[in-house]
């Protein structure tokens, strides 16, 4: 079983842990809708799924056909 030979000081331990940081997600603005969303992610706006300014899925057409 692994067992440390010497105690690691608080300073040495904390210096190793300085690299683990929480990062703020990068927010993009859609050129078509002006909606804020995460980069490289599709987002819904008014019943449509947009990715890179283009409509991927249009739920408003499906709802009109059902009515």
Image: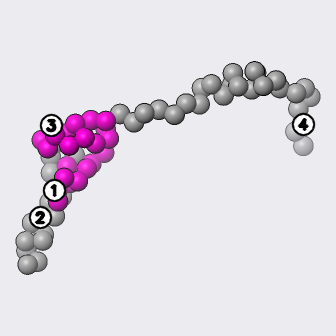
The image position of residue 16, as x and y in percent, is 69, 25
- Asked if marks 3 and 2 touch (Cβ < 8 Å), the reply is no
Q: CA distance from mark 4 to mark 1?
A: 59 Å
Q: Height in image: 65 above or below 9?
A: below
Q: Which mark lies nearer to you, 1 or 3?
A: 1
Which callout, 2 or 4, points at the residue further toward the start of the chain? 4
The image quadrant that residue 40 belongs to is: top left
Magenta span covers which residues?
27-50
Identify the secondary structure beneath mark 3.
loop
Look at 27% across and 35% down and name the residue there.
28
Pointer 2: what residue? 60
Which mark is drawn over residue 31? 3
Left or right, 40 with respect to 56, comes to right
Which callout, 1 or 2, points at the residue further toward the start of the chain? 1
Pointer 1: what residue? 46
Which callout, 4 or 1, points at the residue further toward the start of the chain? 4
């Amino acid at each position: 079983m692994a067992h440390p030979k010497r105690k690691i000081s608080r300073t040495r331990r904390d210096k190793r842990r300085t690299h683990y940081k929480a990062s703020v997600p990068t927010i993009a603005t859609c050129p078509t809708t002006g909606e804020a969303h995460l980069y490289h992610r599709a987002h819904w706006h008014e019943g449509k799924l947009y990715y890179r300014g283009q409509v991927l899925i249009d739920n408003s057409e499906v709802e009109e056909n059902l009515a």
